[in-house]
Every structure is written in C-alpha cells, then in structure tokens.
Image (cartoon, rainbow, N blue to C red):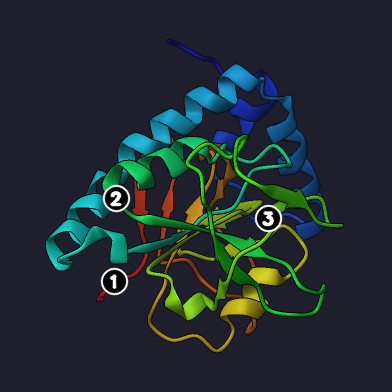
Amino acid sequence: MQSTIPSGAQASLQPTSNLDKRALRKRLRSERLLLTRQQRDYASYQAMRNLLPLAQYFSHHVTDKADIRVGVFIDAFGELPTQPLIDWAYRQGFSVYLPVVSAADKALNFAKLQHANVRQARLVRHRLGMHQPAYGETLRVQALDMLFMPLVAFDRHGHRMGMGGGFYDRTLAKVKGKPLKIGWAYDFQCVEQLDAHPWDVNLDMAVTPSRLWRFKRYVR
C-alpha cells in the first residue's frame, strides 16, 4: 500500500527554526489533521518497522518479556496512530499501560491495558478528551520501562514540544533513569531546533515513519 502526504504537510518535512511556539504548535496540529485515515495508518505501520532495535535490546536484557512494561497513549487529536504500536508490544510479549488522568495539576499514573485492540478494551474518555482504562490498579511512571509520548514537535537534540497540558513534563520532572522516554510522531513533526525551558523533559529517542532517532544512550 502506498500513501502520499498532502502538500501542506510536505512543506514541514524541511527543518523549522525560530518560529513562534504558538504558531508552530497551531501549524503542526493543522497539518496532522490534513492527513486521511489511510495516510495516518500507513505512516504508523512504517514507524512500527523502526522498533526492531528496541525489541532486540529488551529481548537481550530480560528473562521474562512480560516483566517489560510499556506506556502508550491512545491517539485522539490526529497524532500518529498507536494501535500498531500496541500490537507490536503485545507481539513482543510486553505488558501495555495507558496514562490515567486524576486531576489537571497531578502527575499521570498508568493502568494496564487489558485487551490488545483498544476498541474492545474498557476505556472511558476523561474531560480532556483522551481515553484511559475504566478500572484497574495504577502504577507510577517509574515502574515503566518504555514510555511512548505524544507531542506536537521535537527537534534534532531531543527537545519536545508537548500537547500543551504539561502532563508528561510534570510526571517526569523528578524521575531519573527509567522509563526510556520515546516520542511517537510523523516525520514532519521534527524541526531543526526548539527553545528549551528548564522544566521541559527531553526525549531519549523518537520513532517516526522514516527512522529511529537516538538522543541519549539508554542503560537499563
């Protein structure tokens, strides 16, 4: 299956710098929404093919793959779809967890996804528009091994522009070591440089349809 990116999104494949943060956020959000469902799904399956090094790394460093906990979000605002990512994690034998919002100013916790197909899982939509498990015990982010995060943009140094709520920066602010922090995005969401703030949490890696980006060596 082949897919093309609309002309508006193609322009963003060029590195972007020195743009007003608000304007950049608005433009990239709009470009994501220009993509058809077929284009989004195709891009996601292409990105999934770049996960092989992660699977190999964890396969060589663990005895029981079920001990590997992977945090994943459910796409809801035009992000790169995460169902193929969830499928990949299940095929590897990993456990999958979704973020749970308790309050707008609180850190995220994570609850286990009980079904590989999110359409068949028992999920509820919280007031910010995202899906999360309807029940189940939750874990703190430090219990995860990998955390795939949504974003609006990232740069070639691993800086991340989040979705605007500050949940992930707040959740990871005092966390050292685990989890491996991974951006999951379209290629056009990579820009040349973002203005970084002291409270911003950088990525260790990013996965896009064209490649796996490594910003920091991960040591389990």
Question: Mark 2, residues whose alpha carbon is within 10 Å: few (<14), some, or many (≥20)?
Answer: some
Q: Which residue is mark 3?
A: 132
| Dot 2: element | loop
For the question of whether residue 130 can be seen, the reply is no
Query: x, y percentage for residue 166?
Result: 73, 70
Residue drawn at (59%, 84%), measured in percent from left and top?
Answer: 173
| Dot 1: element | loop
8 on left or right of 55: right
Q: Amino acid at mark 1?
A: Tyr
Looking at the image, tell me whether mark 3 or mark 1 is earlier in sequence order: 3
Answer whether labels 2 and 1 touch (C-beta < 8 Å).
no
The C terminus - image quarter? bottom left
Q: Amino acid at mark 3?
A: Gln
Looking at the image, tell me whether mark 2 or mark 3 is earlier in sequence order: 2
Residue drawn at (51%, 71%), measured in percent from left and top?
Answer: 202
| Dot 3: element | strand
Q: Which residue is mark 2?
A: 93
Point out which mark residue 218 bears: 1
The N terminus - image quarter? top left
